[in-house]
């Protein structure tokens, strides 16, 4: 029987952050449970600052990505059913972090000493769930304040491991974050 991994999403979840883990974790026999505020189809986005220096763009731009179905609503889930959580970025965390059931699940997974992986804006969920106090984390630089408001120490590195928490800046760190996360899941 495979172990379940909690993957929260919402509209504007970052496509590369999410789909890499969504397909990679089952390769090691982990079942990814995609959940949202409601069980329904969600829109993902390409969430980046366009790299064209001839067209300045100071903030993150979202372009439509693929769709992904959440098979469960946060309110119907119990943290004890999960071996860990993978939290992706994009704009979704900014909105879904207000969901008290999402925060409950993430906080209970952290309190149970289960591994958590987080990329990019996902740090906003960890802060809202009040589970990074005293932790060393990384994220995209523009979310440094979100990490610090959660009581974490922001570290200007691509990937940071603190206990059973692994954080990465963004989708460019997918491979390193998932290697560490899978290692943690296998020993936890």
Image (spheres, grey):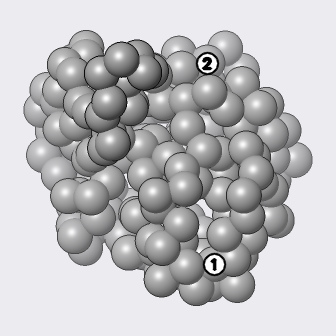
Point out the image quarter for the N terminus. top right
Whether residue 185 is visible, yes or no, is no
Q: Tell me the residue at 21%/22% (across/down).
A: 63
From the top left corner, tell me how far across and down residue 128 is, in percent.
38, 75
Q: Is residue 71 left or right of residue 184?
A: left
The residue beneath circle 1 is 152
Whether residue 136 is visible, yes or no, is yes
Name the residue nearer the viewer: 63 or 128: 63
At label 2, counting other C-alpha atoms closer than 10 Å, the crowd grade (few under 14, some 14-19, many 20 or more) is: some
The residue beneath circle 2 is 24
In terms of image quadrants, where is residue 139? Answer: bottom right
From the top left corner, tell me how far across and down residue 166 is, in percent.
71, 52
From the top left corner, tell me how far across and down residue 176 is, in percent.
77, 32
Of circles 1 and 2, which is in front?
1
At label 1, counting other C-alpha atoms closer than 10 Å, the crowd grade (few under 14, some 14-19, many 20 or more) is: many
Q: Tell me the residue at 45%/42% (across/down).
A: 88
Q: Earlier in the sequence, mark 1 or mark 2?
A: 2
Q: Where is 154 relative to 1, above or below?
A: below
Q: Where is 66 relative to 104, above or below?
A: above
Which label belongs to residue 165? none
Q: Tell me the residue at 41%/64% (across/down).
A: 124
Q: Tell me the residue at 21%/67% (across/down).
A: 99
Most distant residue in the front direction: 54
In terms of image quadrants, where is residue 29? Answer: top right
Q: Where is 105 relative to 130, above or below?
A: above
Number of numbered tags placed on the structure image: 2
Q: Is residue 48 left or right of residue 3?
A: left
State the CA–CA distance, disc 1 to disc 2: 28 Å
Identify the element where label 2 is drawn. Answer: helix
Is there a contact, CB below 8 Å, between mark 1 and mark 2?
Answer: no
Q: Is residue 28 left or right of residue 46?
A: right
Identify the element where label 1 is drawn. Answer: loop
């Amino acid at each position: 029987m495979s172990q379940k991994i909690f993957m929260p999403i919402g509209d504007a979840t970052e496509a590369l952050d999410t789909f890499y883990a969504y397909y990679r974790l089952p390769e090691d026999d982990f079942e990814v449970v995609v959940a949202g505020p409601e069980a329904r189809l969600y829109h993902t986005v390409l969430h980046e600052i366009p790299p064209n220096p001839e067209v300045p763009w100071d903030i993150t731009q979202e372009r439509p990505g693929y769709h992904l179905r959440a098979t469960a609503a946060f309110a119907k889930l119990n943290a004890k059913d999960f071996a860990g959580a993978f939290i992706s970025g994009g704009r979704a965390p900014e909105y879904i972090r207000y969901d008290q059931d999402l925060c409950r699940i993430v906080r209970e997974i952290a309190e149970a000493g289960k591994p958590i992986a987080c990329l990019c804006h996902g740090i906003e969920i960890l802060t809202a769930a009040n589970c990074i106090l005293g932790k060393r984390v990384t994220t995209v630089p523009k979310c440094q304040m979100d990490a610090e408001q959660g009581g974490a120490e922001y570290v200007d590195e691509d990937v940071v491991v603190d206990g059973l928490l692994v954080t990465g800046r963004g989708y460019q760190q997918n491979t390193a974050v998932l290697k560490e996360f899978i290692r943690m899941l296998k020993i936890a």
